[in-house]
Every structure is written in structure tokens, then in C-alpha cells.
Image (cartoon, rainbow, N blue to C red):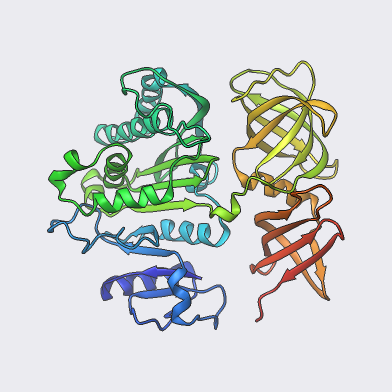
Amino acid sequence: MVILDVHKPELRARLVSALDELGEKWVDPKTDDPSVIAILQEVGSVPPPSSTRELPIIHVWEMGRHPDGTGHDEGNAFACPRVRHLIGAKPDVDLAGLSSTLRHIRTGEFLGLAGLLEWGATIHTFHEATSANKDAHLGRLGAFLQECGITKTRREILETALEEMFTNAVYNAPATTNGEHTNAIRNRSERVRSKRPFVVMFGADNHHVGIAVRDYYGSMSLDRVIGRLRECYSVDKAQHETKLGGAGLGLFMMLRSVDRLVININPSQFTEFVVLSSRTRRMRESRGACPTFNLCALSPELTLRRHFRMATAWDARITTSELSATEGKAIVRDISVSGAFVQINDETKSKRGDVLSLRVQIAPDQSPFSLRGVVRWSGRSSTHGCRGIGLQLVHPLDALEAYGRAQPGRITSRGQTCSVSKIIQTWSTGGTHPGEPVTVFFRVLDEKGRILLLRHDTLTKRWAMKVPTT
């Protein structure tokens, strides 16, 4: 279930109209708060009011700028700690934003730049590790925006957003395993390096231009983002420069100036900032519009370091290596929900921090697919008895797709059969001690569009499933 929060009757009517236009089923869950609407997976599954207290909230708002008030929490969209998403409703309800937000909540997929732009949009990708090249990336972005016909004012806004995201990736994100931020205290005019390269992306479709920066530390905390934005929208506008600084003020300024801001957080894995700006609105219209905001984060139970690793023998080819410019044959020897071990030949030179792309072929009768990852270590594996590299996959869904291709498409348990169309999330328990059985859990979509929970015992090879009653 998804809870949408809206405080004005007129806005509620517009939201209901937008839900109907998207073909979404909705119902009032009969809570004491008449502003809450529930979007249900199935009709008839209205929960008691108490069960809605732990659900994430999508807030529908019309306030794109700081309220002209006394500085209290009245009108502060971030006052409730359960708010993770804000859907802009000025001048109109953001249908695309609402649709993609619902998809994220239901599937757990992060909202990356490629998924937010139209299918087929060209996205330019650059890998970076030093602050010295910031101006070069700003120059590339400026030239790209000029080719797209973006006005000077909007170009300056987007260049400022990239500068903020770039600075965060190279100065604020790098951290040790103990949580110490190694570059945060350095002067921003001082040149620094990030031990883990980060990614700068920008692209455009017919409606939006977009920018994204992803670091591979995942040191940004969900509570910190919400807390800083709550503080930004609570204090008087004149106090921002004196009371706030760093990431809090930067986030606030980006949210005020773009049409959509997305923050994807996978703790200890990566943090990604994505901004979108309209190509169809005039700047005067954009200034009066209300942005859409998404804070997408994996829950702690889905980011466990100990995962079941599936043994494989998949042929692969390293197709790109932006940092070392090598390519060669490889074999994927095992894969988990977060990484993979890849056997490589002696001619393939890879070092920690390199970003590799692999084209993987599971079987001759199956179409190949791609995996992208950051090299975490290289050397000889005692488990596999060969030389190779340990990859941390750029996106966990890459591993899930790979795992799903190797699992049965149809699963039967206690006389019930389901056809899995997509694996959404997976995690495992056990395997801590030698000989201890491992149980793998899957949250999947079946061919009917239902979300099912599957359990696989790797010792007995038996499946169990929880199928919702209709």
C-alpha cells in the first residue's frame, strides 16, 4: 500500500483526477485524517487505521518556495519524518513524477537518469576521481545545454546544480569504514581525490534535460537529508546563510531551482543525485511551479553484507574499462545481490577503483546482458582456484536480473504455481558457519502483476511462496 497525503480539498480532487488518469485504484482507508488516500495493490485490502502509521508517505504539495511565515513547521512538507516523496502540484499534478514514484515504492527500483528520461535518450557518461577536473565537466555540460537550445538562465541553474553535486561527490562523500569523512574538512579550493571514482552523467529528451552524479561510498544518511531539509524549510529565509551550510543549503537551493530532484541512497554502496529541468516551460513558469522530490533508499535489512553467492560459469567479455582501457575474455564464477567474482586472463589489467562493463552470455540460446561494476580487489581466489577480480555491481538490480535468468521461470509450492516475470528484491539468511544451510528470499512480480514473497532452501532445493488471497 502507498499513502498519499494532501491537505486541501481542491488539491485532493485534482489528485484523485490524476490517479484516475493513471489508471490507479485508490480508496480512503477510513483514518481519522481525511487528507490521506491509500493506493491499493488489490481492491478490498483496506487496513485498519493503526497499520497506516508505519507506511511511507507521498506528500502532494503546491509550495515550491520557502513560505512567507513565522518560521514554524506549519506548511513544512518535511515536518513529518515519514515523508520520503513530494509530488509537485503547481500548476498541475506531476503525472510523470507520481507514476514513477509509485513504481519505485512498489518495486524498490531506484530512480536513475536513464529511467526518468524517455526511452532512447542519449546519456553522456564520464568517470572522475579528482576535483581538478570540475571546470572541464562544467564546460562539457554548458556546451551540451547550448546544443539543446537551453536558455542562458536555465544553463546557469543546471551548471550550479552540477557544481554542487560534483563537490559533494569529491569532498563530502569519501569516507572510511569507520565513517570518517576524509575530504570534508579540506578547503574547497584545495585539490583532492576520491579513492573510489564517481560518475557524472547528463542527457536530454524532448521534455527534460537531466544531470546525475553518483559516488560509490553511500555515506549520505537518509535521516540527515530529511533533517537538513526540514531545518531549511523551518527557518527564516534570511537565516539560511548564517544557520545552515554544506549539503543542507545545497539541497535546499537545488530543490528550489529545478523541476525534479531525486536522491538514491544505497547505504555503504552508493549515493546518487539526479536533477531534471523542463525544456518546455518558460523560466517564468518554472519559477512559479512546484518541484517533485524523491528520496529513494534501501532499508537496512536489504543491505546486509553477507549474501548468498550463486556459483556460475558464464562466459563474458569486458567490453569497456574507462580507466584502464582494456578488454578481454572473462568468466563470471559467482554472483550475489551486490557483487560478483570474475575470472580474467593475464592480459587484462585492472586495479581497485576501475569501472568495468561486462557482456555476459549465460547460455547460447539466451540473449546476452550487461553488468557494470567497480573493482574492489584483484588477485587469486582460493575458493575458485584462479586469478580474478571482485566487482561491486553499480546497481543491485543488475545482479537480480542475472540471478533471475538462472532460476526457474515457473515455481510450484504446495500445489500452487506462479510464473515470475521480474525479481524485485532478494536477501539471504544463514551460511554464517560452515555447513549451515542458506535460505534465499525473493520479492517478485508474477505474470498477473502481483507482488509475491518466495523462499528458497538451498539445501533441500525446495521453494515456498506466500501468495496473496483474492
Instruction: Pick whichever, 240 or 273, lies toward us.
Output: 240
Expressed as whole percent of the image width and height from the top left, the position of residue 101 reads 46, 58
In this picture, residue 213 sits left or right of residue 164: right
The number of numbered badges drawn on the structure is 0
Which residue is at a point 35% across and 82% down the rendered structure image? 32
Expressed as whole percent of the image width and height from the top left, the position of residue 126 reads 50, 26
Expressed as whole percent of the image width and height from the top left, the position of residue 324 reads 63, 18
Determine which quarter of the picture holds residue 13: bottom left
Expressed as whole percent of the image width and height from the top left, the position of residue 370 reads 68, 38
Instruction: Pick whichever, 143 or 319, lies toward us.
Output: 319
Which residue is at a point 76% across and 15% down the rendered structure image? 347
In the image, residue 237 sits, relative to residue 392, either above or below, namely: below
In this picture, residue 340 sits left or right of residue 75: right
Determine which quarter of the picture holds residue 274: top left
In the image, residue 25 sits, relative to residue 263, either above or below, namely: below
Judged from this view, the residue extending furthest toward the front is: 433
In the image, residue 115 sits, relative to residue 373, either above or below, namely: below
In this picture, residue 318 sits left or right of residue 396: right
Quadrant of the frame with the C terminus = bottom right
In the image, residue 71 sits, relative to residue 183, either above or below, namely: below
Which residue is at a point 36% across and 20% down the rendered structure image? 135
Determine which quarter of the picture holds residue 106: bottom right
Instruction: Pick whichever, 354 or 361, lies toward us.
Output: 354
